[in-house]
Image (cartoon, rainbow, N blue to C red):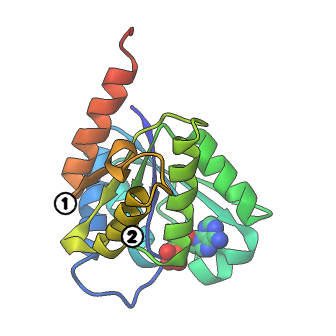
Amino acid sequence: MSSICVYCSSSDAIADTYPPVAEALGRELARRGHELLYGGGAVGLMGVMAEAAHDAGGTVTGVIPAKLQSREGIAYDADELIVTDTMRERKRIMYQQAEAFVVLPGGYGTVEEFMEVLTLKQLGYHDHPIAMVNVDGFFETLLSFFAELREGQFARAPITDLVHVVPAAETALDRLERALAQDGLPS
Ligand code: AMP
């Protein structure tokens, strides 16, 4: 069992295309015996994913700053809810407890969280696998900007050296599991 940290939208106003992907990820994490580590909210894709993981018998850990509890709700689907004083503390706990990361469609918060684990990986602070679920091409604009960064030598490595860009939740977990298994092998 691995602790897999998921960053995703806290919005309930997004298109119907996205919640099924969050639901599939939650269910699949539980079915494969992984712990879901996430932002602890009951809203948006976070809520859908946590409920699916919980209903499928999975282990769910939420980490939420006290200030956001009223806005993002409290995840009753979490087996463990860690309430932090600050956003920084939330991010630190999620980062430190995670063995792998998944990013689903989301807004500024999701993008910020993803950028942090991406840049830390580029700098060698961690070597955990990261999967980006590019649902219906949601991340294409960001990916083409990353390609421009690479082309202009602003980025040291192509994004695909650092992140598994995949079309679906199941594929994300296949890739992460493979990377985690390889990590355990002697070099
Ligand atoms: P969003 O993608 O904006 O819907 O936010 C997704 C999650 O990121 C929510 O749980 C937010 O609380 C969280 N979030 C928002 N802003 C930040 C930030 N500056 N740093 C870390 N997480 C954030």
The C terminus - image quarter:
top left
Which image quarter is the N terminus in? top left
Quadrant containing ligand 1: bottom right
**Image quadrant in which you'd find residue 74:** bottom right
Q: Residue at x 26, y 65 (%)?
A: 134
Q: Residue at x 33, y 75 (%)?
A: 141
Query: Which residue matches tag 2?
Result: 145
Image point (37%, 59%), residue name: 151
Residue position marked by numbered label 1 in the rendering: 167
The residue sitting at the top extreme is 186
The x and y percentages for residue 30 are: 32, 46
Dot 1: element: loop
Distance from label 2 to label 1 (Cα)?
Answer: 19 Å
Q: How many numbered discs sit on the rendered protein? A: 2
183, above or below 26, in the image? above
Q: Please report contact status of discs 2 and 1: CB closer than 8 Å, yes or no.
A: no
Q: Is residue 48 visible?
A: no
Say what amino acid the circle numbered 1 marks: Pro
Residue 68 placed where, x, y %?
67, 76
Quarter assignment of residue 25: bottom left
Q: Amino acid at mark 2?
A: Phe
Residue 146 image point, x, y percent: 40, 63
Q: Is residue 63 above or below residue 48?
A: above
